[in-house]
Structure formats: structure tokens, C-alpha cells
Amino acid sequence: MATTTTNFGWDIPQSTDLVKDGATAIAALGQDIDTAFVDFKGGTTGQVLKKSSGTDLDVEWGTASSGLTLINTTSFSGVSSQSVNDVFSATYNNYLIVIDDLVKNSGAGDLSIYLRLRVSATDSTTGYYWGQGYSLFASDTAGTGRVNNGNNFSAAGCNDTVKGYSQIWLQNPFLAKTTGYQSIQTRQDAGAYSAGYNSAATSYTGFSLVAAANNMTGTVSTYGFNK
């Protein structure tokens, strides 16, 4: 008569079994193994196995999760504003926006650009609260901070000779609750740090970069933090 394995309870023959009983037990063992490992079947190139639950051998094929997933990259040239639509969704709660190689196209003075949250192809211009402090690279002394209660977040800046770079973190823009904001910027000849929030309980789906003056050229990438 067949017995079973210790861990998974698979049927195995005993040394005292008749030949016919042993063959039956071996067939049952093969079917037990085939059934137990069915979740390992399939998958495509680049996928990984991950647990579906705490049940033994309960696994599934999927994409390997990293900290960030690139959602969108948009390049712009010679524009006064650039909108990025439909990048916020229920897939992620928190986002990183990276602005690269920002340059001013023409005009007097520095280039400062701002970020406005957006939904249904319309920018929101209310509920922005943030503060900013910065250091001047040339003298390495603390600059004057500022507090803003206005219609946008600070995003990036540059001048005729120094490109602008920026990393902006947004928390919960898609959820109908307060949206958190932080940014680190290389702007003009200074480094700046900003933090604040948008008080509107609105589900935003995108954002716009808006130049205070002059036109701008650069690239903006949006990443989602995996849950």
C-alpha cells in the first residue's frame, strides 16, 4: 500500500507493495507533482516568479518590481508651457518628476518655471502652499528663503549659461486628498530646496510646466514609486 511524503503528502510506493500497487503509486506521485507545480508553468522572457499567497507552491509569473517605473518622457523646445497628461493614476500613490537640460531660449533675465497640477486638460491655479531656501554657488552662503501662497509650485530655473536640473516628488496627486510636494533644484547659479502642499481634495491626472517669462527647452520624465 502506498504512503505519502512528509512535506507535501505526495503518494509514494512502499518496498512491500506488489508491483502493480507500486506502479499505481508512482503514477499518482507523478500526477501529484504535476498538479503542485502547475503555477511554475508559463511566463515570458524577463519575468520572475513571485509568491501569490502564503500557501506552499502558490506562485505567479510577473514583472520584477524595482523602486521606480518610468511612466512618460516628454521633450519640449521653445515653448512657454508644457503639459503632461494622464500620468497619475491608481497604479501609484507617489511620483518623481525629473527635469533635465533645461535651457532658456531667449529674452532678458533668468528663466523660472513653475509646476501646476492638472485634471481634464485644465490646470489648477489654487491651493498651493510652499516655502523655499537656497544657497548661492559662487559664494557658498545661504540665500534668502521665501514663502509662497499662490497658483503653482516652484519647479526649476536657469540662466543664459547654467542649465537647470530638478527632481520633484509628489505624494498622492491622484487621490482626492492633500498633495504633498518637495523639490531639489539646480537653478540659475544656486541650489534650491522647496517643500509644501496643495490643499485641494482633487484627483489630479497630470501637470504643466509654465515659464514665468521667456521660452524654455528641455526634457521632463515622470516616474511612479511601486507600491
Image (tube, grey):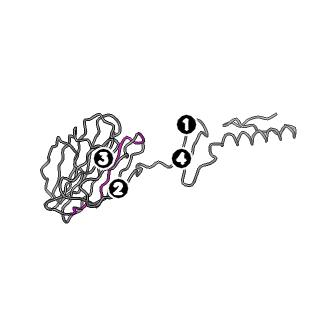
Q: Residue 74: which disc?
A: 2
Residue situated furthest bottom in the rendering:
161
Q: Report if the CB atoms under discs 3 and 1 are less than 8 Å apart.
A: no
Determine contact: label 1, label 4, CB under 8 Å: no
Q: Nearer the viewer, mark 3 or mark 1?
A: 3
Query: Residue visible at 23% across and 54% down?
Result: 156
Q: Position of residue 160 (x, y in %)?
A: 18, 64
Return the disc, 1 or 2, that comes first in the chain's sequence.
1
- Indicate left or right for 207 with 136 as reference: right
Closer to us: 145 or 78: 78
Q: Residue at x 55, y 36 (%)?
A: 53
The spot of residue 157 in percent (x, y) is 21, 56
The numbered mark, 4 or 2, whose residue comes first in the sequence reads: 4
Q: Amino acid at mark 3?
A: Phe
Question: Does the residue at mark 2 contact the one at mark 3 (Cβ under 8 Å)?
Answer: no
Give the mark nearest the N terminus, 3 or 1.
1
- Calculate the distance from the C-alpha at mark 1 to the C-alpha at mark 2: 38 Å
> Which three-letter amino acid code belongs to the residue tagged 1?
Ser
Say what secondary structure mark 1 lies in.
Answer: loop
Q: Secondary structure at mark 2?
A: strand
Q: Which mark is residue 62?
A: 4
Q: Is residue 223 left or right of residue 214?
A: right
Q: Residues within 10 Å of mark 2 (few under 14, many from 20)?
A: few
Q: Could you tell me how far apart the alpha carbons at marks 1 and 4 are, in whole angstroms?
A: 14 Å
Find numbered disc 4 in the image and state the secondary structure of the residue it sits on: strand
Q: Which residue is mark 3?
A: 207
Q: Which residues are magenta?
A: 90-105
Q: Earlier in the sequence, mark 1 or mark 4?
A: 1
Q: CA distance from mark 2 to mark 3?
A: 12 Å
Residue to which mark 1 is pinned: 53
| CA distance for labels 3 and 4 | 30 Å
Of marks 4 and 2, the one in the foreground: 2
